[in-house]
Amino acid sequence: MSSPKRYTITAALPYTNGPIHIGHLAGVYVPADIYSRYLKMRGEDVVFVCGSDEHGVPITIKAKKEGISPQDVVDKYDAIIRKSFQDFGIEFDNYSRTSGKTHHETASAFFKKLYEDGKFIEEVTEQLYDEEAKQFLADRFVVGTCPKCGYEESYGDQCEKCGTSHNATDLINPKSAITGNVPTLKETRHWFLPLDQYEPWLKEWILDSHKKDWRSNVYGQCKSWIDDGLRPRAVTRDLDWGIPVPVEGGEGKVLYVWFDAPIGYISATKEWAEQNNKDWEPYWKDEDTKLVHFIGKDNIVFHCIIFPTMLKAEGSYILPDNVPANEFLNLEGNKLSTSKNWAVWLHEYLEDFPGKEDVLRYVLTANAPETKDNDFTWKDYQQRNNSELVAIFGNFINRVAVLTHKYYEGKVPAAAELKEIDEQTLAELKAYPAVIASSIEKYRFREAQTEMMNLARLGNKYLADEEPWKTIKTDEERTQTVMYVALQIAAALATLCKPFLPFTSTKLNKMLALEDANFDWNAISSAKALLKEGHQINEAELLFSKVEDEEIQKQLDKLEATKKANIAEDKTAEPQKETATFEDFTKLDLRVGTIVEAEKMPKTKKLLILKVDTGIDTRTIVSGIAESFKPEDVVGKKVTVLVNLAPRKLRGTMSEGMILMTENADGKLVFVNPDEEKMNNGTVIS
Ligand SMILES: [Zn+2]
């Protein structure tokens, strides 16, 4: 879309069963905020919405665990999350809640419209049921093996490992998350969105029309789902926490959280429009509106396939123009994990680094996982603060402000005759807004921020080359000109750094006494002078300060302590299972075997297809070990094989047996194998 009339920008609704950490900020909220701030500085008509996602099963599980009501859970975390966003300058036009009245009405009406238009399939199906808990088991109430990648702790609605979304009944070996029992099947009526019927349209809309402008990770995931074939998805659940199904037969059921949550973007826009005396509809229904969803990669299927299908089925809504999903951010080489406390929590960060909101924003953008998973390390944080923000940006501004006060009592001097270097520097300055804009508009925020820093580098180098602290003794006019040019760069930075470093921008504008100037993005290039001669600036103030080694060590020690606690916790052995009789045991036929061939299962991350010599035969076994071992590492390995396990098909390949594995304290897979040489394949283990 070349010149949209207005923009609707959404950021993934954080799920209110815990606080948020740096991974959330890096993946979704900082890039969305940069984009929104930038557009507003260009004078565009923008609404930027988000809100707390407060329905769904995990919240009810958390409430049960803590012995409080689901409402108490969401009230607690909504307040914490809301404050974190304010603290880090994520400037939403409206941060709403899906438990609110407007949202309940909007989502309910949306469902009803699709229902009345006959867009759903209504089906009585067999759902997993926990006889002991007397309750249907939807989504996260079930845990089992992912049918796609073989991950054994996949949730009923989505596999955390491979990101695939599925129905709870698709899981292999499902178990109730409430009682641990094997669930039974029981009939219940539900409404399904027939995604399969929209497949031809999705192919055209995504695979044909968005091949070039969507990120390759987003496009690739969509393609893989569409190629695998889409199936109808239930949009209702047997649950008592959520938005009641508003049609006949819907008693005791609520809308699936993933059906209601994205409608939250619409509800949040409605609330905002009401508060600001505007019409919400053009922001969602006018073809000249550009709709952009900022999300993490685990949400791609919902924002690129399911929600657009809902919008398309409803008929009056526009579709997203882009969904710039980020990959994941890791912390010191390990996956961020709420349950393992492997995270930098936003509220804790500010206790340790008060006033350094922008430093975190800066480092997270500099390291943004835009095209691949990336790593946050404290060393890198320190280095970027000390040698970029302090040594380049801060140093330049400080020199400019201090020298202006020292030489001219804080008044911008008049420029004398401009030399070629001055003309060239000013011309470069004027080119920056377009360069940074071009990167932001392509959703390349790291690149955009690097360009912003290049402007600070330009200023730093200009001062170092022209040395006003030397010319002041010999050439009054030259010094005035150099300081005049340097002050223009400082003023440009105050505006251009705002999307990335909003707190710094405010401080710098105050220092340059520019609070009322309100430069918009375009004025940087068009204004004759950003700071006119004679303009009085305020006292110099340090924008950034060094982060010392001890502060970094403290953070590393904290993580080390978390690691130790996790290992200790992991060492608490699982409780012993039920007694097995000798007969039960002898049913298992365990043999010594050797892996003779290994290859990766195409399109999966976890599975290896192995050929194993069992002494009886050479057979195919599919094993979920690809994340721990490369195929070439396991060929020739002696292993323990359960040879009489009922064969089962995994991703189209028949697997005949199982290789025994365990896990070490770091969570790495380890083979259980005979520890003597000369073990013949086929030897019975008893
Ligand atoms: Zn999976």
Image (cartoon, rainbow, N blue to C red):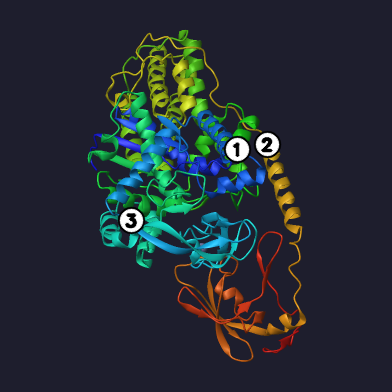
The residue that mark 3 highlights is: 120
Q: Is residue 10 visible?
A: no
Closer-to-camera residue (582/660): 582
Residue at label 2?
A: 549
Mark positioned earlier in the residue sequence (2 or 3)? 3
Q: Position of residue 467 (x, y in %)?
A: 46, 23
Confirm or deny contact between disc 1 and disc 3 (CB under 8 A).
no
For the residues bearing labels 1 and 2, Cβ distance under 8 angstroms: yes
Sequence-wise first label, 1 or 3: 3
- Mark 1 residue element: helix
Indicate the amino acid at tag 2: Asp
Numbered disc in front, either 1 or 3? 3
Q: Secondary structure at mark 2?
A: helix
**Pointer 1 residue:** 382
Q: Which residue is at 40% across, 34% downward?
A: 102
Q: Position of residue 52 (x, y in %)?
A: 49, 38
Q: Residue at the location (27% across, 44% down)?
A: 318
Label 2 CB sits under 8 Å from any ligand 1 atom: no
Name the residue: 63% across, 46% down.
64
Amino acid on which the number 3 mark rests in the picture = Phe
Mark 2 neighbour density, 10 Å: few (under 14) some (14–19) many (20 or more): few
